[in-house]
Amino acid sequence: MRAWRANRVGFTLIEALTVVVILGILVTISGASVSRQLTRDRVDRAAAAVEGMLVEATQLAVRRRVPIRIRRSGRVLEIVERGTGTVVRSRGFGAGSDLDATLTLSPSGGVTIFPTGRADTVLTVTVEGEGTRFVVGRSATGIVRRQ
């Protein structure tokens, strides 16, 4: 008489659970790394947007031949015609935007850029978000660079 042998197909429950646990550990480790990189990229994009706005403010002052003011209003960076108070451009950096970051201006009131392209003082904008920080500066003569 033949002994009955079961045909084993597939994995045991222990083998399947071991694979699931190992995959969970790997996903957790890589997820934290990916999250940090996404945050850094978002803050980097915000700093690039600030750089662009500082350059654009100089161009607007020269082209329109009027003083332009760069200021922060809450979590919005604004380019404003100084004489009329008209907001020419604005960009939000608040929660829910693609550029969720905190902006700090020094001087806190912003700067005025004159039609010659020169500003009344040096402007430093600190862009921060979840442990990542970039500093964008504009000299009084109009040179914009990330520090």
Image (tube, helix red, strand yellow):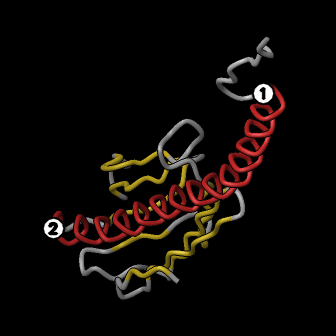
Residue 83: give x, y in percent of width and height. Answer: 34, 56
Q: Does residue 109 lie above or below 31 as drawn?
A: below
Q: Residue at x 55, y 70 (%)?
A: 125
Q: Label 2 vs label 1: CA separation?
A: 74 Å
Q: Residue at x 42, y 70 (%)?
A: 112
Query: Tag 1, which secondary structure?
Result: loop
Query: Which numbered dot is residue 132?
Result: none
Query: Tag 2, which secondary structure?
Result: helix
Q: Nearer the viewer, residue 138 or 81?
A: 138
Residue matched to label 1: 12
Q: Residue at x 77, y 47 (%)?
A: 25
User: Which quarter of the figure has residue 65?
Assistant: bottom left
Q: Does residue 89 lie above or below 128 as drawn?
A: above
The residue positioned farthest toward the left in the image shown: 63
The residue positioned farthest toward the right in the image shown: 14
Q: Nearer the viewer, residue 120 or 39?
A: 39
Locate residue 54 relative to residue 128 in the image: left or right.
Answer: left
Name the N-terminal-most of marks 2 and 1: 1
Locate residue 49 relative to residue 5 in the image: left or right.
Answer: left
Q: Nearer the viewer, mark 2 or mark 1?
A: 1
Q: Residue at x 23, y 64 (%)?
A: 60
Residue matched to label 2: 63
Residue 49: give x, y in percent of width and height. Answer: 40, 60
Q: Which quadrant is the N terminus positioned in? A: top right
Q: What residue type is disc 1 on?
A: Thr
